[in-house]
Structure formats: structure tokens, C-alpha cells
Image (tube, rainbow, N blue to C red):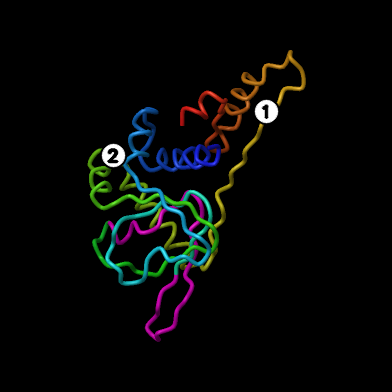
Amino acid sequence: MVTNQWHRLQFTRVLVTLFGEMEVNRLHQLQEQLEWHHLSNGDLLFRQDDPSDGMYIVLNGRLRYTIVNGNGETVAVGEVAPGETIGEFSLITDEPRSGTVFAVRETKLVKITPERFHRFVQEYPQMMTQLTRIIVERQQRDLKQIKPLAPQQLTLAIVPTSATVDAARFARELAAAMTPFGAALAVDAASFNAL
């Protein structure tokens, strides 16, 4: 149960990045419309030249993508880390898959079908700006042959040392103080269970 809630919390962060801020009930509706998948190490997600069947958001684990170059050699191009998308290029261009993608460790991901993608783009036009940014950043990273860095995430548990310590207030203040360095979220049991 906690693992599923953790995956939903990770997914919520990605959705907010793609779609912008939205109400919790709308996040729940989006989550229910998507397909959740699990890949084991070595499992294939899709092959180069396959038709596009959607895009994927990696929640945890890691994917690797390869291409077959002009000499017929398979070349590792890069990896996809948690919080990143894969398959968006083929989905946007309606072209076959440009590479082969497989899991290099246990990976949990979410699939957005073409129909849902087009509906989301109409409803959240800022999604296209975010996806364009993702594609450009990945292309630049691949051209430099730099492996992706895992998103720098930090999870802290605030545990009061005595009954006089207001841990909830401290967590909220800490999250507010951390916002200049990136997204910060104070989550208590009630808000965690609501995800």
C-alpha cells in the first residue's frame, strides 16, 4: 500500500511538471485514466521502427534506449531516469519509434495513449511546451554523451524528540525555506493518504 502511494506521489510531481498546478481531484482523475506498467530488468518496452502506441513516464527504475546505426550496429544512446518521459517524440510526430527501449532494472512506469495525449494537449496546452523542453534537453544530453543524472530528490522524515515540538509546523517551515532550491512538499499522513 505504501509503495503504491509512493508511486502516486512521484507521479503527481511529474504530472504537475507537465500539466501545471491543478486540484487534487483532477490529479486523481488523470491518474485513473492512465495505464500503470511494471518492467523487470531486461524487459522490452518497444523496438526501433515500431508504431507509436503512446508515451511513458518513468516513476522509478531506469530505461536504456539504443538505435541501430547506418552500419547496422546497435548503439546505446542514453538512459531515462525517474521523472522523465520516453516515447513522446514518436507520439508528437506520428512517426515510428526512433529507438529500442528496455529496462535496465525493475521499473514502474505510466503509459499515456495517443487518444489521451491529444485530449490532454487540448486541455493543458502548456504540456507541449514542457514536452518540447524534455525532447531538446534529451537531445542535447545525448549529443554530449552525458548520462542522465537522477533527479536530485531528498526525502526527510521529521520526528519530534519530545511532545513539545510541533513537527507539522517545523515541516511546513522547512518546506517553505527549501522552495528557492526547487520543489518542496510537506506531507503528513492525511495528505499522503489522500494521494
Which amino acid type is marked by label 2?
Tyr
**Pointer 2: residues within 10 angstroms few (<14), some, or many (20+)?**
some
Residue at the image position 56 percent from the left and 56 percent from the top: 149
Q: Is residue 83 magenta?
A: yes
Residue at the image position 65 percent from the left and 22 percent from the top: 170
Residue at the image position 53 percent from the left and 23 percent from the top: 190
**Pointer 1: residues within 10 angstroms few (<14), some, or many (20+)?**
some
Q: Quadrant of residue 179?
A: top right
Residue 125, position as x, y percentages in the image: 27, 42
Q: Are marks 2 and 1 in contact (CB under 8 Å)?
A: no
Query: Closer to the camera, 161 or 172?
Result: 161
Residue at the image position 30 percent from the left and 48 percent from the top: 128
Q: In the rendered structure, find residue 192 and report the number of the disc placed on it.
A: none
Looking at the image, which residue sits at the far right?
A: 161
Residue 175, position as x, y percentages in the image: 59, 28
In the picture, measured across the screen, residue 26 lies left or right of residue 179, that is left
Q: In the rendered structure, find residue 158 and report the number of the disc placed on it.
A: 1
Query: Closer to the camera, 101 or 179?
Result: 101
In the picture, measured across the screen, residue 136 lies left or right of residue 54, that is right
Question: Which stretch is magenta?
Answer: 66-91
Q: In the rendered structure, find residue 124 and report the number of the disc placed on it.
A: 2
Foreground mark, 2 or 1, reads 1
Q: Earlier in the sequence, mark 2 or mark 1?
A: 2
